Amino acid sequence: MTVYLLERDGVLLARMPLSHVEPFSVHCTFEPLPTFEPYRALFEEDARLAEELVTDPDPALLGRAEALLERILALGLSVRREGGGIHREVLIGIEDHTAHFRPLKLEEEPL
């Protein structure tokens, strides 16, 4: 089974066993470690705003979502395969016990 590791500055935040792959994203089960706790609220707010934006195109709401995305990207999170592999910066979404990600550089293949 393929397992991905979510890290920040070399600190392991979560294990993410592969669930399935779509053309532009990798979907996983999200298994956070205690080191993820300082970031949990950011991702909960991100998921909430994403859901709200589906039905409310309010520019102020979109601005809040974009600002939050910038804060998440500023964390410099990376993903690699368990057992080695290349660290890649990713755009990641986390909701409850699921995560989906893709490399930030579109020309990169998923891990």
Image (spheres, grey):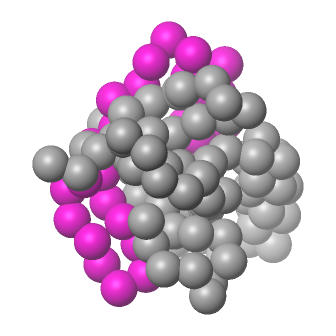
Asked whether residue 41 appears in the rendered view, the answer is no
Q: Is residue 89 above or below residue 53?
A: above
Along the line of sight, which residue is nearer the eye, 92 or 103?
Answer: 103
| Residue at 76% across, 46% down | 76
Along the line of sight, which residue is nearer the eye, 106 or 55?
Answer: 106
In percent of width and height, residue 7 lies at: 59, 36
In percent of width and height, residue 50 lies at: 56, 60
Q: State the extent of the magenta-drawn residues as a range.
A: 18-46
| Residue at 81% across, 72% down | 59
Determine if the magenta segment contains residue 104: no
| Residue at 76% across, 53% down | 73
Q: Is residue 62 above or below residue 100?
A: below
Q: How many marks?
A: 0
Determine if the magenta segment contains residue 26: yes
Q: Is residue 59 left or right of residue 97?
A: right
In percent of width and height, residue 23 lies at: 35, 85
